Image: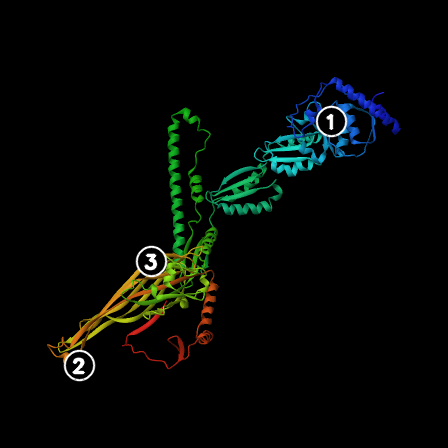
Amino acid sequence: MSLISLYRFDMHILRRFFYIPLFLCAALFSSAQDETVDLLTEAGDDSVAPVIVPVEPESSAPEKMLGTLVLIDDTALQVLDLLEQMTGKIILRRQDISPAKINFNSNGPISQKEAVLALESLLTLNGIMLADMGGRFMKAVPATNVNSHVPEMIAGSTLELAASQQIYAKLFKFDYLNAELISGTLVQPLLSQNSSMIPFAKSNALLVTDALVNLQRIETILSDADRPQSVREEIKFIKLDFVQAPEMQERLEGLIEGPLKSYLEGNTSITADERTNQLIVITHPGNLGPIMDVIEKVDVDAAPLTGSEVFQLRQAKAEEVVPIIEDIISGQKEGREEDAKVAKENETAGNNNNRRNNNNPLANAGNNNEPAPTASSSTSTEANSSLQFSNFVGLSADERTNSIVAYGTKQDLKTLQELIEKIDIPLPQVLIEAIITQVTLNEKQTSGLGSFSFMYNGALREFSEIAAGTAGGINFSGGKISLDNPSAFELTTGITPTNTDSDTRVLSAPRIVVSHNEEGIINVSRSQPIITASTTSGVSDSLNSRSSVEYRDIGIKLTVTPLIGADGTVQMVIEQTVENVIENIQIDNNDQPIIGVREATSTISVKDGEIIVLGGLQENTGTDSNNYFPIIGRLPGVRHIFGGSTDDYERTEIIIFIRPTVLENPGQAGALSDEYIESAAEKEAIETYLEDRTTGDIYLKGSSFEEKEPVEINSTQPRSATRTR
């Protein structure tokens, strides 16, 4: 009776009685056949390096048949003993092997190979994994710790090994699949419980640790999937001669999503290349036929449909926009003519080469299959590839309505509309606050900046402190004053003359809002009459003189042109001019003023809210005065004894403080105006004027509003005014 046949008995005690002696006999028999191995050396270290399992060719000998295999409440240790007898290997076991009861009935004779696979599967189902150590030994460990015991690595194909539930590691390398991509989508669902998987992105490989039978299943699936993907789409470049590529793209996409949808396979992608006027079509080869038919029927030379349209401008000036667009149109036409010229030269050169090759049969043989380019196709294609406007386009500016009247094809009008919308946008604005001051310098002063103090964060700071860097929150460098909190500083009240200097005057403190790249002018002056021409008529005893008078603004003029950057930086071109009457001279018995001019031009970049200090426009004036004693001092010969003369010398400097504040949107300018009105002393009078739109009998005098009778101004008197434009 064989060992397997003993398990067919139904009596549990009899089965237990025969079990131990038979296993001992089998173990002794197996030990006598194999060479002696030191158990402690083989099993002493669980972390021994994995051994590459060689490919074992399957034996062609007939499989050994056993009887019926029956297990009734056997422990895992008993199953391991039985497995040792069948495989002839020694199984090293951990002490924490699962005590589960195992039951099995083969219901008939099975081969030894099938019995080993069944026992390994039963152990795996009960949380016990077997790892081959090479040679005569295997390890039985809990399934949760199988990876820490370094299972053996399989080199070559797992499909050539006999199927088993033993744990192995296999490195799968791919030629076409992406290891990281398939690890979670394809391989992960195939893994058994307590198995592991590690993707290697750089080498495009996947390390899988699992039972051999599952590794074989994974290898079968991956070998079929790791193949070059069949290309189902074709890329086609189609040049257009008459229709613009974006227009053709729009038409084709409408047909593909509509009437042609049922005739096309897969997905179709169409992209327009405006530079070369080409269509890039990616689609199934079977779809190219219908698409090419549509293109050939539509891309024909036809009389264009023209029309006209009026574009109303809201921000820009029509007379300034039209020349810009005309330059673009003329530039494109010149490019078209140049392309046509080059194409014609290439055609001529090609014809000359063909004539030379006619005398050379060998050279001509290689060119028989190349069609010569025609003049119409090459010229038309090259010309239209870079042309956005047709020859029918035209436009004109209407200054009265500030609009542009355009004429051309539908595509011309569409392109013009896109250009105008990009040009006709509101420009960014900047609020420019200025304080214009005049400082009288003494002999020790070289600059008038020391005559000012700054009120910031409730503290009064002398300019000497700011220059030395000891004033908290205020910094001075390169003619610019920067504040830690610019919004908390009011320019008109924050800059004040020092208490010790009474020769500092604030001439004006204007505030203007200027658009980007527009000129803003601050003019603080008075009108001075100047005789420009004189005419004398009549006879010698009765002459009449008539003079032509021209009024000239004499004072301080500040011109600012800001350029506002995207980061809030403001670059300003500042022109400052200071004019004053030095003295008067007699010309043809008429008093004519001698006008002194001081001017400077500078370009400076500042951050939003920084303060610019402009100074250095100094003037030296001197006057002579004579002092005499009454009566005696005017007598000839003694006036020098009883009188004298005095020379008065005075040096003044114009200092201007400028602070730009960028207005991010048009509504911010209105908010600043409301804030200024709210803080004004004449708030009620200003609000009354804004509501009624009439001044009535209200006139401005100094800094307050007063009611008074209108005053008639004598035209013969000099006029003085402070004007801000």
Q: Nearer the viewer, mark 2 or mark 3?
A: 2
Q: Which residue is label 1 attached to? A: 91
Q: Which residue is drawn at 56% across and 34% down?
A: 202
**x%, y% of residue 134?**
68, 24
Task: Name the residue furthest right.
Answer: 11
Q: Give the structural element (helix, strand or loop) at label 3.
A: strand
- Residue 513 — which label? none
Q: Give the structural element (helix, strand or loop) at label 2.
A: loop
Task: Name the residue furthest left.
Answer: 637
Tag 3: amino acid: Ser
**x%, y% of residue 719?**
30, 74
Spatial CA distance of label 1 from label 3 is 94 Å
Q: Give the structural element (helix, strand or loop) at label 1.
A: strand
Tag 1: amino acid: Ile
Identify which residue, 524 or 212, lies in the foreground: 212
Q: Which residue is label 3 attached to? A: 602
Spatial CA distance of label 2 from label 3 is 54 Å
- Against 506, residue 207 (above or below) is above
Q: Tell me if 56 is positioned left or right of 424 in this view.
A: right
Q: Residues within 10 Å of mark 3 (few under 14, many from 20)?
A: few
Marked residue nearer the N-terminal end (1 or 3): 1
Tag 2 near tag 3, CB within 8 Å: no
Q: Does residue 9 appear anywhere in the picture?
A: no
